[in-house]
Image: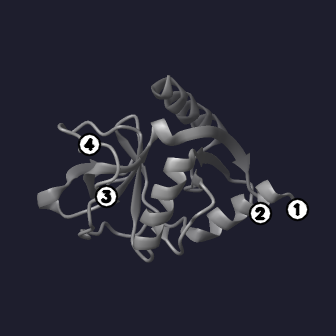
Amino acid sequence: MTIQMTYLLSIIFLFSCGQAPPTDQKTESNNSTEQTQTSDHLKTGWYYLTDKENGIEKTLKGTEETHFIEPTPIVTVDNFTDLEIYQSNYGDYGLTIRLDDKGTKEWSVATGKSINKKLALIIDNELYFTPTVNSQIDVGITALNRGDLTEKELKAIKLKIEKEKK
């Protein structure tokens, strides 16, 4: 098994793929990241979930689940260095996102603070993924692996991210 596959499998097991009912969890803001968004438009990246009073309401794409997103990002598309679509041993598809050094540090802190809590992945101002963090991730890799997206859908998502990154 390659190192890349080992990391990928680690990430898949660190996040639960099931979608639980919406939660309103209060989290601390990460002041060392980019400035807080000033509108309801969120830049592509990972965010904390928060409560109704402090968050921006988003519906999980393809569902009726509503979550409130803290407007200050953990990491953004600016921290993404490489995107790769993969197929798991179970036949479902996912998207691996590698992070730069700054993103790796911020992601490690965020996942360390968020064990047993959910984080949110926003892509093109839409909520795509709300996994539960099972352990700290310090290898600089994140993933979109809901289990219900096709390879074609993930290719379109990858293109959206690459377009925003330019």
Look at the image and tell me in which quarter the N terminus lies.
bottom right
Q: Earlier in the sequence, mark 1 or mark 3?
A: 1
According to the picture, the residue beneath numbered tag 4 turns out to be 35
* Badge 3: residue crowd in 10 Å (few <14, some 14–19, many ≥20): some
Residue 62 visible, this orientation: no
Label whose residue precedes the other's in the sequence (4 or 1)? 1
* Among numbered discs 2 and 1, the one appearing first in the sequence: 1
Point out the tag, 2 or 3, that comes first from the N-terminus. 2
Q: Position of residue 57 (x, y in %)?
A: 22, 51
Relative placement, left or right, of 11 versus 115 is: right
Are the two marked residues, 1 and 3, in contact with CB atoms closer than 8 angstroms? no
Secondary structure of residue under mark 2 = helix
The numbered mark at residue 1 is 1
Q: Could you give the CA–CA distance between mark 2 and mark 4, rounded to whole angstroms?
A: 34 Å
Q: Is mark 1 on a helix, strand or loop?
A: loop
Determine which quarter of the picture holds residue 106: bottom left
Q: Which residue position holds label 3?
A: 30
- Determine whether label 4 and label 1 are within 8 Å by CB: no
How would you rate the neighbour count of disc 2 (Cα within 10 Å): few for under 14, some for 14-19, many for 20 or more? Answer: few
Tag in front: 2 or 3: 3
Point out residue 24 in the picture as x, y percentages from the top left corner: 24, 68
Q: Mark 2 points at which residue?
A: 6
Q: Earlier in the sequence, mark 2 or mark 4?
A: 2
In the rendered structure, find residue 138 and report the number of the disc placed on it.
none
Q: Give how far across and how far down residue 7 sits, in percent.
A: 71, 61
Q: How far apart in space, not on screen, are marks 4 and 1 (Cα)?
A: 40 Å
5 w.r.t. 101: above or below: below
Front-most of 165 and 145? 165
